[in-house]
Image (cartoon, rainbow, N blue to C red):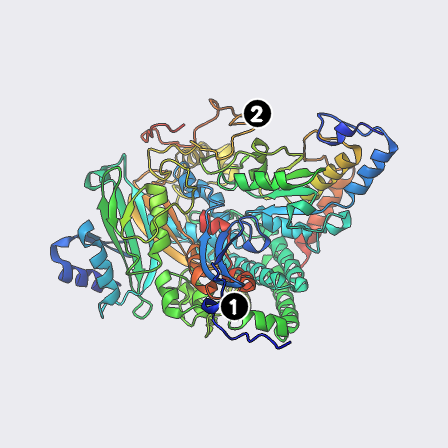
């Protein structure tokens, strides 16, 4: 028998074919739970895709309008739930911008340290999930082990492993524990060791490299026009990081680099995140040094702004003095009175530019809270990344975007 | 910081720019709805603006406050320049129960899903949008939840609830419990 | 033979023969999960299945992403109104005997998303066996819920139950105080 010549075009076949529709999600292991993709396939190649988010729409923006300004903090934790402190930081800074107040230095440094710890957990989870979806279970479990260490530290500080709600408008909820700096300093080398071990496992593995290099490429102009940010944009070659462009808190005083990729493929996103873990460790260690340099008892040493209309009084004053009781009552029942106006404040979240647009019409209730979640924009870039790839390529591409449902669908 | 953007917009569009302001470091320019798309395109293409990065597009419903006299919905778009590192917020106001505005999809591709979200949450339609359908909610949903006259707990279940269960479990039943909204001045119809 | 109807979701069925008790014992130590993970609780679910708080020691480790192959539906995270038909369909596709664990407050009662978008608890759409409250619940609470479910499977009990705070055992107070002092002293 002669072998069949396989180099004729599809249209020359006697039986013309139509694309097959396939539904992926919304309950699918690789779709991180809540994205539905309606694919049009030609064999294994994706010729069209309709990405449908919204299966985790919880109405957080509407809930923001129903309470006071401080009551929105738990909702912010549940936006990007793998890096909850970064969302807290973003929202607290947005309200403080509207109020026009400055936060004491100690609170700023604490925000930086906790934020970077959250960024590390974000990248650990994301990279671990990408590796797991490609078949490498071990890096995921090792990263989970490291994440547990970080969560233990954050639990000792904030009271919760994951949904901290540690920040308040004007500072943090309470001062750090006495051995916070020591514990964090001891933890960072162990984090780096595990990252090194995982790199040794993955980065020379032929399967990993073939499935991530050259797959899911994103063009830089399209990425900028789509509004992608964070590792997705930086892997495409655009050097945009809010911490460097518009330094906030004490990011201007610490020395760190921003990793930028070249091709915009999955491998670049994976490597950018891995490298950002190292840079976050650098920031944390330098910030620990800055924290220790603060004079105890100086105005910098406070963890809340010294304004009775914003910071909650301490419990002893609430129960023993009438002023404390009244202050507590007014702050809780009426909310912090924020002047009228509209602002947009942005910080570098785990996935990119996390922005909060707040509209106030005076009073203690927000008029509108809008969350500019970076993964909504990254997910929009997903469609061009997977079109003309194969079904199997959807899995690492989608994983490397780090779509977090809470932030995407709000 | 981004005053140049406001100045260039005023030079180019003259009367179409209703107001410009700067509040807490944010530069804002308000334009008439007719000039919405042209202003966005100008911000992207003009050599001294070069706002090639799309940041955000959304809306605010002003029903019930003084701002509503100028137009019920305030739609804003924030654009940024990666090269020049400046950004501006462009706003416009649209009115009515079924407001309509030009789509910015031709100018910034990121506006696609943002406009779908505005339509979903506020009911603002965008002329020229390739695929205007709901994005965060389901097709069968009636109404637009982020409007001020949509009660937050008015749910429209797709799957009918099982017998023997009711909408609110104890300790708070449907007519008990403290309402969230503490300010007595805000009386939203239909809200608890 | 025992009362077969009791196994299939009777109101308070209990096993009556040794064979059914054996079946209950076998089922409870070999649960295949369907992790219907949607939101933040998914992170605690990974942590519970991870190396520190191990699900594998209960035999409940194997995730099967097909409803045809799984026994326990772990509803992890908020179920929005849009996701509800999907959840119902997955539940209906599972084969008997099947159990449901509502992991987290959003799955148990809607959580603090008391609004148009969220189903106020999955028991509005599917019957639920164990509720594990918490936002997110600590892995210890999840394991408590799993052990509660395993106990119920072993007895053939289908009444819904909830994980409650347990009282500390004798001597636990002093032990915790000593651990706290140690933690405050240590400088790693």
Q: Quadrant of the N terminus of chain C?
A: top right
Element carrying mark 2: loop
Q: Which residue is mark 1?
A: A266
Residue at image location 32% in from the left, 51% down from the top = A343
In the displayed structure image, the side of residue B106 where residue C181 appears, left or right: right
Q: Quadrant of residue A322?
A: top left
Residue A296, given in percent of the width and then of the height, sits at 51, 57
The image position of residue A399, as x and y in percent, is: 54, 60
**Which of the chains bears the disc numbered 2?**
B
Mark 2: give few (<14), some (14-19) or many (20+) Cα within 10 Å: few
Q: Residue A230 or A105: which is nearer the viewer?
A: A230
Asked whether A328 or A383 is in front, the reply is A383
Tell me the number on the disc at residue A366: none
Q: Which mark is residue B163?
A: 2
**What residue do we see at 55% from left, 76% from top?**
A5
Indicate the quadrant where residue C153 lies: top right
């Amino acid at each position: 028998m002669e072998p069949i010549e396989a180099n004729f075009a599809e249209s020359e076949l006697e039986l013309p074919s139509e694309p097959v529709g396939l539904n992926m999600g919304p309950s699918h292991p690789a779709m991180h739970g809540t994205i539905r993709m309606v694919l049009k396939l030609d064999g294994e190649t994706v010729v069209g895709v309709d990405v449908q988010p919204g299966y985790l729409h919880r109405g957080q923006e509407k809930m923001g309008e129903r309470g006071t300004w401080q009551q929105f903090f738990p909702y912010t934790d549940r936006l990007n739930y793998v890096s909850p402190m970064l969302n807290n930081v973003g929202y607290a800074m947005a309200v403080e911008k509207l109020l026009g107040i400055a936060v004491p230095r100690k609170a700023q440094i604490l925000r930086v340290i906790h934020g970077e710890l959250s960024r590390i957990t974000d990248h650990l989870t994301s990279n671990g999930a990408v590796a797991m979806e490609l078949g490498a279970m071990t890096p995921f479990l090792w990263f989970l082990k490291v994440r547990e260490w970080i969560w233990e530290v954050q639990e000792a500080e904030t009271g919760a492993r994951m949904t901290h709600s540690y920040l308040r408008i004007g500072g943090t909820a309470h001062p750090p524990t006495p051995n916070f700096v020591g514990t964090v300093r001891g933890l960072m080398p162990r984090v780096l060791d595990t990252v090194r071990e995982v790199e040794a496992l993955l980065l020379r593995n032929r399967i990993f490299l073939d499935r991530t290099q050259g797959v899911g490429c994103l063009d830089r102009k399209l990425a900028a026009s789509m509004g992608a940010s964070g590792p997705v944009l930086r892997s495409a070659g655009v050097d945009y990081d809010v911490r460097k462009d518009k330094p906030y808190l004490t990011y201007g005083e610490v020395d760190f680099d921003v990793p930028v990729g070249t091709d915009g493929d999955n491998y670049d996103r994976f490597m950018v995140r891995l490298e950002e873990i190292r840079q976050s460790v650098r920031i944390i260690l330098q910030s620990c040094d800055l924290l220790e340099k603060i004079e105890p008892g100086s105005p910098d040493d406070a963890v809340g702004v010294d304004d009775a209309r914003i910071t909650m009084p301490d419990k002893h004053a609430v129960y023993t003095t009438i002023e404390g009781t009244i202050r507590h009552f007014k702050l809780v029942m009426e909310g912090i009175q924020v002047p009228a106006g509209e602002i947009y404040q942005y910080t570098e979240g785990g996935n990119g530019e996390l922005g909060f647009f707040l509209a106030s019409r005076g009073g203690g209730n927000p008029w509108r809270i809008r969350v500019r979640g970076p993964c909504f924009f990254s997910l929009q870039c997903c469609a061009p990344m997977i079109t003309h790839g194969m079904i199997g390529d959807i899995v690492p591409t989608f994983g490397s975007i780090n779509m977090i449902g809470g932030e995407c669908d709000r | 910081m981004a005053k140049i953007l406001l100045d260039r917009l005023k030079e180019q569009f003259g009367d179409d720019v209703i107001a410009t302001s700067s509040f807490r470091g944010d530069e804002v320019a308000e334009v008439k709805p007719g000039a919405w798309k042209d202003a966005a395109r100008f911000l992207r293409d003009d050599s001294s603006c070069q706002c090639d990065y799309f940041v955000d597009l959304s809306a605010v419903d002003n029903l019930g406050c003084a701002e509503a006299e100028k137009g019920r919905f305030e739609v804003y778009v924030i654009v940024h320049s990666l090269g020049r590192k400046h950004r501006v917020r462009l706003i416009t106001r649209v009115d009515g129960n079924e407001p309509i505005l030009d789509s910015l999809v031709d100018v910034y591709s990121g506006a696609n899903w943002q406009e779908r979200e505005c339509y979903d949450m506020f009911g603002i339609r965008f002329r020229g949008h390739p695929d205007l359908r709901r994005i965060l909610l389901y097709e069968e949903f009636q109404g637009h939840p982020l409007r001020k006259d949509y009660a937050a707990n008015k749910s429209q279940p797709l799957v009918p609830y099982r017998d023997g269960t009711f909408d609110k479990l104890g300790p708070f039943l449907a007519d008990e419990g403290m309402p969230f909204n503490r300010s007595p001045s805000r009386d939203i119809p239909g809200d608890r | 033979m025992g009362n077969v109807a009791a196994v299939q979701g009777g109101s308070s069925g209990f096993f009556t023969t040794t064979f059914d008790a054996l079946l209950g014992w076998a089922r409870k130590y070999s649960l295949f999960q369907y992790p219907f993970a949607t939101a933040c609780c998914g992170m605690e679910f990974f942590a519970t299945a991870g190396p520190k708080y191990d699900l594998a020691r209960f035999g409940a480790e194997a995730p099967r992403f097909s409803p045809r192959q799984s026994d326990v539906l772990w509803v992890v995270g908020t179920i929005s109104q849009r996701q509800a038909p999907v959840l119902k369909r997955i539940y209906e596709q599972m084969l008997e005997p099947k159990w449901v664990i509502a992991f987290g407050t959003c799955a148990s009662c809607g959580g603090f998303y008391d609004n148009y978008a969220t189903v106020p608890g999955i028991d509005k759409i599917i019957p639920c066996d164990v509720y594990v409250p918490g936002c997110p619940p600590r892995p210890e609470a999840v394991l408590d819920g799993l052990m509660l479910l395993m106990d119920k499977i072993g007895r053939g009990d289908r009444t819904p139950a909830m994980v409650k705070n347990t009282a500390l055992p004798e001597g636990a107070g002093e032990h915790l105080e000593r651990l706290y002092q140690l933690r405050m002293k240590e400088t790693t």
